Amino acid sequence: MSLQLIFQNIKKIYSKEKNVHFVSNDKDFLAACKGLLTNLQIYRSLDESIKSDICKAFIDVDESEKTLIRAYCENNSQEFQNRIAEIVPNFLAWKHISSNKIPDDNNECTIVSSSEPDYVSCDFSEAIYYGEGILVVPCNFKTDVEVSYYLYKADYYAMDQILSVSDHNDHYFEVEESIQISVKALIRFEFEIQKNEALKGIYLRNCEIDSLKQIEMTS
């Protein structure tokens, strides 16, 4: 669905309802919505929205579910790492990295593609359970990515380093480069919990990156 269509739907709901809340990790789109719809309540992640006062009033955490999920996390760490590895490449595609190591005019590059991550670490001691099988966990990982940026030709000719470049226009090269990055994010895990008198079962239904907290070059 296009951003324009999403905005039109938000605008339609906004015209009828007094309190409208919207979640998106696209900060520019959120800013545009807020600029046009001043009373719209916006959140950059599900975690941020759930922590809001209006959501807290509706959250009733079942402690038995919380205990069941905690035990599952302790016994299935490899499953979590595998699921995170699967979603990282698509999530990172076209994200921007800012660093003074990047010789672009704006010291910025764009991720074109990503490998599956290494050194995945989930901090379940800081995890927050919101009920309904939703657990949000802080996570760190490193991964290799292919990035692109634009380099002023005169600056390139003055460099000692050899880069993979192609003509962008008369004044700039487009550069493609492999780098390693370190990422901090909040991961949302969604569990299916089956409870009856004879059996309590649980399985991991879905895994998504809820919000990107930090992305840095390590090489």
Image (spheres, rainbow, N blue to C red):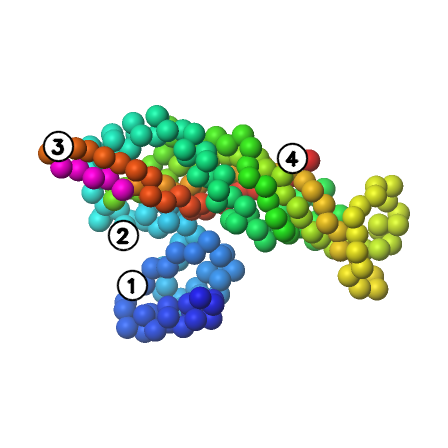
Counting residues from the start of the chain, the first of labels 3 and 4 encountered is 3
Q: Which residues are magenta?
A: 192-196
**Helix, strand or loop status at disc 1:** loop
CB under 8 Å between discs 3 and 4: no
At 54% from the left edge and 46% from the top edge, which residue is drawn? 89
- Mark 4–mark 1 Cα distance, whole angstroms, equals 43 Å
Comparing labels 3 and 4, the label whose residue is closer to the camera: 3
Give the prevailing secondary structure in the magenta stretch: strand
Q: Which mark is residue 54?
A: 2
Q: Identity of the amino acid at label 1?
A: Asn
Comparing labels 3 and 2, the label whose residue is closer to the camera: 3
Counting residues from the start of the chain, the first of labels 4 and 2 encountered is 2
Query: Where is mark 3, residue-wise?
Result: 198
At 25% from the left edge and 30% from the top edge, which residue is drawn? 67
Judging depth in this view, the residue of 206 and 187 nearest the camera is 206
CB under 8 Å between discs 2 and 1: yes
Q: Badge 4, how many Cα within 10 Å: few under 14, some, many 20+?
A: few
At 27% from the left edge and 50% from the top edge, which residue is drawn? 55
Quadrant in the rendering for residue 153: bottom right
Comparing labels 4 and 1, the label whose residue is closer to the camera: 4
Q: Badge 2, how many Cα within 10 Å: few under 14, some, many 20+?
A: few
Counting residues from the start of the chain, the first of labels 3 and 2 encountered is 2
Whether residue 176 can be seen here: yes
Q: Position of residue 1 (x, y in %)?
A: 44, 66
Whether residue 135 can be seen here: no
Q: Name the image quarter holding the C terminus.
A: top right
Query: Where is mark 4, residue-wise?
Result: 218
Query: Where is mark 1, residue-wise?
Result: 19
Q: Identity of the amino acid at label 3?
A: Ala
